[in-house]
Amino acid sequence: MDYIELTIPVASAEQAEILTAYLADYPFDSFTSEKDRLKAYIPQEQLADCKEQVDALLAEQGISGARYVSIEAQNWNALWESNFEPVDVDGRIYIRAPFHAAPTGGALDVVIMPKMSFGTGHHATTHLMSATVADLNLKGLEGLDMGSGTGVLAIIAAMQGAAHIDAVDIDEWADENCRENICTNGVAEQITPILGDASAIEGRSYDFILANINRNILLADMPRYEATLRSGGTLLMSGILECDIEAIRTRAAELGLQPAETRLREGWAMVRVVKP
């Protein structure tokens, strides 16, 4: 599969984060941030359907000089190896690629081959969700990782003692990558990858749900999450900016979900709610 790399000049890290949040509403798979530019990646075949809207968005944000470049599939892994950096979650969890050295000390060692479903631009939300999962007692519980991507959150939950996790993602490449990663980390018996959208969880039930996606999908799919969440269960949501917190909380309250915790990092947010 060939990809398009969209390079966008940015004035600050904050502007890069805001643009990442906006572009996440389109079929961009991954993002990387550099000093003065943001790079966003999208399957070439999907760009035509949204290029006009993306260009309009950039114009609205006062961005000029953005450029699209085609990337051949065979060059993709080399590109990720040059951009991907390990994620150190408070010295407790170390998320790394196979080509990085293992951590020293007692940190949980999570090995992820990023491929097309993990980007350095998502480190803040990965950190927020991972740290919160590490703080919860998941032993013996059943959960859902919605929009699982590489499966990193499901893997961490399994390592924290969860009995079983469904890892659901709509992207075929992410589903394949998740299957590889759960085998690499020795948790394949605890995690079931499912290719599909939120309709795939109908009729199921969970003690906890992890959803690191984006504002629009969270708002649209939250009723499905609530319907599958068991009484006393917890729902973690991220992939949102600080300015999105109120909308997420309001929607959760409408569904009878009670606020439990909010965490912030680098302009991003994680909202945790519970079902009475």
Image: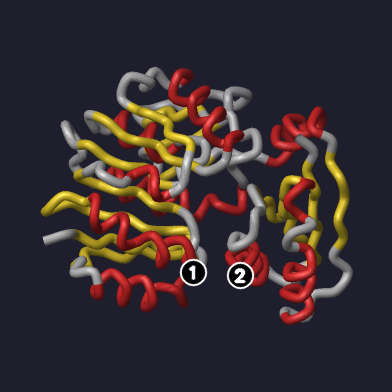
Residue 88 visible in the displayed image: no
- At label 2, which amino acid type do we have? Ile
Secondary structure state at the residue bearing disc 1: strand
Q: Which mark is residue 7?
A: none
Residue contact between numbered discs 1 and 2, judged by CB atoms under 8 Å: yes
In the displayed structure image, the side of residue 2 where residue 258 appears, left or right:
left
Instruction: Locate residue 12: give its quadrant.
Output: bottom right
Label 2 crowd bin: few (<14), some (14–19), many (20+), radius 10 Å: some
Q: Residue 97: where, in percent of width, then height?
A: 58, 29
**Separation of residues labelled 1 and 2 (CA atoms):** 8 Å
In the displayed structure image, the side of residue 25 where residue 227 appears, left or right:
left
Label 1 crowd bin: few (<14), some (14–19), many (20+), radius 10 Å: many
Instruction: Locate residue 139: give its quadrant.
Output: top left
Question: Which image quarter is the N terminus in?
Answer: top right
Residue 19 visible in the displayed image: yes
Residue that numbered label 1 is attached to: 241
Secondary structure state at the residue bearing disc 2: helix
Check the image and report above or below for 264 versus 34: below
Q: Residue 230: where, in percent of width, then height?
A: 16, 49
In the displayed structure image, the side of residue 38 where residue 263 appears, left or right:
left
First reached walking from the N terminus: tag 1 or tag 2: 2
Q: Residue 62: where, in percent of width, then height?
A: 78, 81
Residue at x 51%, y 64% (from the top left corner): 266
Please state which of residues 13 and 202 is positioned toward the viewer in this rendering: 202
- At label 1, which amino acid type do we have? Leu
Residue that numbered label 2 is attached to: 18
Check the image and report above or below for 256 versus 41: below
